[in-house]
Amino acid sequence: MNKPVPQELRTDAKVVARPRHPLLRLKALQFNQEKIVLAITIVLFAGFCLTLDQFATPGNLISLLQSVSILGVLGIGMSLVVIGRGIDLTMVTIMAISVGWVFNEINNGLPVGSAFALGFGLAVLIGILNGVLIAYVEIPAIFATLAMATFIYGLGHFALVDNDTIFVSDQLSLFKQLGAGYVGDVPASVIWAAVIALLVFLLLRFTKIGRFLYAMGDNPPAARIVGIPVRPMIVLQYTMSAIIAFVAGLLLTATVSSMNTRLANSTMIYDVILVVVIGGIGLSGGKGGVRNVIVGTLLIGTLVNGMTILDMSFTEQKIIKSLILLIAIVVDSLINPRDEQTAQQGDI
Amino acid sequence: MSVLRKCSGILIMAAATLFAASATIAAEYDDGLSNGYYQKLKGKKVAFVPITMGFDLTQGWYAAMKRQADELGYEIIVRDPNWSIDAGAQALSQLIDEKPDILIFHAIDMQAYNKLIKKAVDAGINVIQINLKSPNNGDAYVGGDWYRSSAMEADELIRLCSTEHGKNGKVAIIQGVPTGPANQIGQMAIQDKLKGRKDITIVADQAADWDATKAHNVAATVLKQHPDLCGFIGNWDNEDVGAAAAVKEAGLQGKVAVVTHGGGQQQAGCDNIANGNFTSYVKWDVRGQARDLNDTIKLLLQTKPKPGSSPFALYTPLEILTKDNLRPNSCWTLDEIKAGG
């Protein structure tokens, strides 16, 4: 929360900030992580523009956006939770299993509407369950969602989906049109990602729910004392991330005509956390917004696109990706040294 | 008189019993092998450790094995490690202690279970390996020849894209997980076929992690770079639907070829050939593999060779499927295999 919190409500009464370098006291030179990442993205982008023939074409830039749109949508969902000082490790699993179930049932002959309703219902139910475990049973979010992710995957393969990869039949042309069609030259998934980003931006900026989320993330005990319904808000938070995961799954399925439920076992969830954190939303909560996720997503998108054009090998790509991310974090911790407050709040 | 009556009663009963006994023997006609066949299979124990039960191949094999086991009265045990090599090795070690008659290995990696194969053989268990062979032989290998399958894919790509056939020869390779053995063997074949050819230019060689979404993103980027690309060569149908989706999105379906291989499951294979997603598809038929697997089980249970003494292989016949030679029964569904198809 941007509003100053009275000293007596702070969880950590002694706040000692390390003095900044005199030059950095100038407002214009105060780089936060978001600006650093944005700067790296711009440098990379300019570098690729100058060195690669086909990089700066509209077609390639659209393809760049499309390739990260699903990651971006998941990142936006994750940011809602992280801002409220939580973490949702079930997102990719919810996406894979609930959407996989939808198309599994459609392939088994269930009417399209009912199948969608079932899948959506499942996602919401899991979200609520996550929230209840965290808010009322008081299990730390990281453990609750870690356990839930395994449970959902197991349940999904035991009872809901027949196969690792669920294919979408050609009859669902309206669905494919909505999820994988084009508006002008822009792919539908990019437009959906933009719409979701806008909705979440409005939610965080202009609604009570949004302001409450920041307050909870900034200082949960203080939020409770000033009368914010912290527990129901936590349930809402995880329900929203589950719904966004479901939507991301639909977009993904429309794009590649299939859902690979094995994604639940992949490292995709770390990529999601990565775009959130690299953009500057601290895992300690209360900071950042949609803009940070967009910046983080663009960095990953630019990097992967450029390296694919350069035809770098899989291993080289991994090394360079992790190096650039490390550089961003190192630069941030050099320019913005941790003070006692952030250190105490911890990054998990 | 009464004694005579009693005696005749006993005689009649004895005759009746004798007749009944001979009648049951007559019902079990033996052609010299058939009685032994049923007896040798009955009550036996066959154990199967797949990579996972979550995909078309293992489900197809299992459905067929289960059907035969139920018919012939032997037991089939499955331990599903769900992609985990550790869990698989643990399940196999435990099964070796339980001493089944046959142990079926489905390795994700050539080295992962290699020692366990020897351990099983030493423990007196007959070993079948399916679809990926480890250096140790065991008793039988049933499955695809990965090198030949990818080599056939490469030949198809040359046929479709070579400058000698009037095309520009520009092709892109989409790999699975680069370090995975199935991928490495396949890439060896593709490189052996394509490297050094003047009529083929490899413009991109990228990995997609066996994942359709990654294949889609790679293919979309490559197509933006090389809109005149002639074809993609992939390594698994489940993954390459992503590349096909990117080709379709770019409005290049029919112009850019997608060559892949797979087990011929209806939705993954033939549906995608029929709708133009895949131009050419090398099929190792899971129905055939399932039958080979069942036959190998029957053979080993009847002959009971000393484990590891005379290893043999049944390589799955490979078939190239295109839109032109697609038949209604070119592919299979799980329900068909369960029903005995």
Image: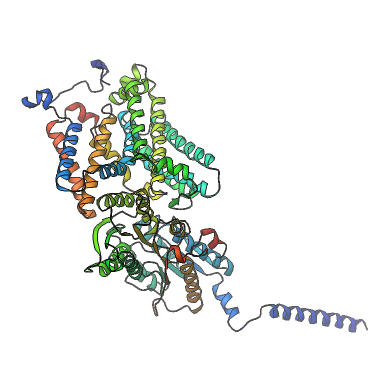
Say which residue appears at 14% left-offset and 24% top-offset.
A17
Q: Nearer the viewer, residue B326 or A121?
A: B326
Is residue A99 shown left or right of residue B251? right
Q: Quadrant of the C terminus of chain B?
A: bottom right
The outermost residue toward the front is: B166
Q: Nearer the viewer, residue B279 or B335?
A: B279
Q: Quadrant of residue A276?
A: top left
Is residue A301 shown left or right of residue A168? left
Looking at the image, residue B59 lies above or below residue A151: below
Q: From this viewpoint, is residue B23 visible?
A: yes
Where's residue A88, x and y in %?
A: 35, 36
Where's residue B159, x and y in %?
A: 33, 68
Say which residue appears at 39% left-offset and 60% top-offset.
B279
Where's residue A320, x and y in %?
A: 18, 48
Where's residue B302, x and y in %?
A: 51, 77
Looking at the image, residue B29 lies above or below residue A64: below
Say which residue appears at 42% left-offset and 40% top-offset.
A178
Q: Quadrant of the N terminus of chain B?
A: bottom right
Looking at the image, residue B191 lies above or below residue B20: above
Q: Quadrant of residue A128?
A: top left
Is residue A320 shown left or right of residue B80? left
Q: From this viewpoint, is residue A270 visible?
A: no
The colour scheme used here is rainbow
Looking at the image, residue B145 lies above or below residue A57: below
The outermost residue toward the right is: B1
Q: Nearer the viewer, residue A48 or B19?
A: A48
> How many marks are shown on the rendered structure?
0
